Amino acid sequence: DSGVTQTPKHLITATGQRVTLRCSPRSGDLSVYWYQQSLDQGLQFLIQYYNGEERAKGNILERFSAQQFPDLHSELNLSSLELGDSALYFCASSTAGGPQETQYFGPGTRLLVL
Amino acid sequence: AQKITQTQPGMFVQEKEAVTLDCTYDTSDPSYGLFWYKQPSSGEMIFLIYQGSYDQQNATEGRYSLNFQKARKSANLVISASQLGDSAMYFCAMREKTSYDKVIFGPGTSLSVIP
């Protein structure tokens, strides 16, 4: 158990809908990262937050957005869902986000768009 | 260009034997970190081992060790005394100081341990 929690574990929805994925980092970690893992794209970095502020953006679509709240939990919002958005979405956390810090991953949310 | 290459899509190993999973990387940044993660069929990503670019010694964590050859830009994971529970996908990842907010993952190697 990494100490990172994600809810829900599974999510099934329809195209065009909007969903919210939630992540709680390990106790004491200020940095949260979101990743998408799909069969064709592999594991891709989406976005990072540090202590409530966006720090870095990766391959995140405009239909997706995220935020980190004062209690440090984070939410990833996915809207206008398409079939291709079906994937495993991971949240990870680290202490401060430095280059040599290990990121600890949550169990993931498996999203299926029908 | 691929920053992380894992040339073995799938591998088999006999239980109790050692196995080496290959990883080569590409960077011009002198400061970087290399990570290995394990993803069992249940889906979670489990951190295994870390190697810093300036570390003088190869990293070791229990049955996991990292064969770090900086000049060759390779960071192979060695699993000793394989167990059935080691069957999983293994991902090599890199984080560069110049873009330290991003972790780049390789395509992964699927390891199957045979009893």
Image: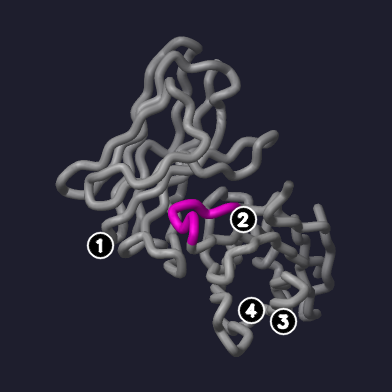
Tell me which chain the residue with mark 3 is part of: B
What's the magenta region?
Answer: B98-104
Query: Mark 3 and mark 1: span between their CA atoms?
Result: 32 Å
Specify few, some or many for label 4: CA neighbours under 10 Å numbering under 14, 14-19, or 20 or more. Answer: some
| Picture mark count | 4
Tell me which chain the residue with mark 4 is part of: B
Element type where label 3 sits in the image: loop
Identify residue type, mark 1.
Ser
Find residue A27 and name its label: 1
Element type where label 4 sits in the image: strand
Identify residue type, mark 4.
Tyr
Q: Position of residue A84 (x, y in %)?
A: 60, 22
Find residue B80 and name its label: 3
Q: Earlier in the sequence, mark 4 or mark 2?
A: 2
Image quarter (top left, top right, bottom left or bottom right) of the N terminus of chain A: bottom left
Circle 2 or circle 1, nearest the eye = 1
